[in-house]
Structure formats: structure tokens, C-alpha cells
Amino acid sequence: MRAHLNPTRMDMLARRAMRSALRLAAHCPACSAPGWGRIDVAWGLPCELCRMPTQAIAAEVLGYAGCGLRESQP
């Protein structure tokens, strides 16, 4: 089966295209350029019992590479 006719791959490509379109629709709060979105994650969500860092995601890091603005959201 050709890759561009594979239903599983077509679904993945459609989801990726939608994510890209949504990212282009989001503008940077500092410079108003399109492309604002998640660029990284911060690891180390504290354990509820002992408050030590775990391997879970503590926050999403949003940003735009053009102006360098970064913002953390839990």
C-alpha cells in the first residue's frame, strides 16, 4: 500500500496538519508574530506524599523562538 493512501498515516497527517494550523493561528504576546506554542516541558512534578520531584510533567513551557519569549504554565 502506498504511504499517502494508508488510512493510519492519513489520520496522523491530518492531526499534525491541524496542530500546525492552530499553532500558526496563535500569536506571540510580546511581538504578535504567529507561531506561539509549546516548545518544551518542565519535569519534576512534586509527589503528593513526600514533595520530592517525580518523573511526571510539572509544567508546559510555551514560547516563540523569534523573540525568545518563554512562559511556564502548570
Image (cartoon, rainbow, N blue to C red):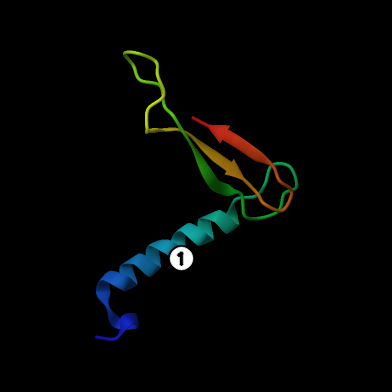
| Residue 65 drawn at (x, y percent) | 67, 52
Image quadrant for the N terminus? bottom left
| Residue 41 drawn at (x, y percent) | 49, 40
What's the residue type where badge 1 is placed? Answer: Ala
| Residue 73 drawn at (x, y percent) | 53, 32
Apparent side of residue 36 relative to residue 30 in the rendered image (left or right): left
Q: Which residue is mark 1?
A: 17
Could you say whether the residue bearing mark 1 is in a helix, strand or loop? helix
Query: Can you tell which quarter of the image residue 71 is in?
Result: top right
Residue at image coords 35%, 20%: 47
Query: Can you tell which quarter of the image residue 61 is in?
Result: top right
- Pick the residue in front: 35 or 56: 56
How many neighbours does mark 1 have within 10 angstroms: few (below 14), some (14-19), or many (20 or more)? few
Apparent side of residue 61 relative to residue 28 in the rendered image (left or right): left
Compared with residue 68, is residue 71 higher up or lower down, i.e. above or below?
above
Query: Can you tell which quarter of the image residue 30 is in?
Result: top right
Residue at image coords 74%, 48%: 67
| Residue 48 drawn at (x, y percent) | 34, 16
Apparent side of residue 40 relative to residue 53 in the rendered image (left or right): right
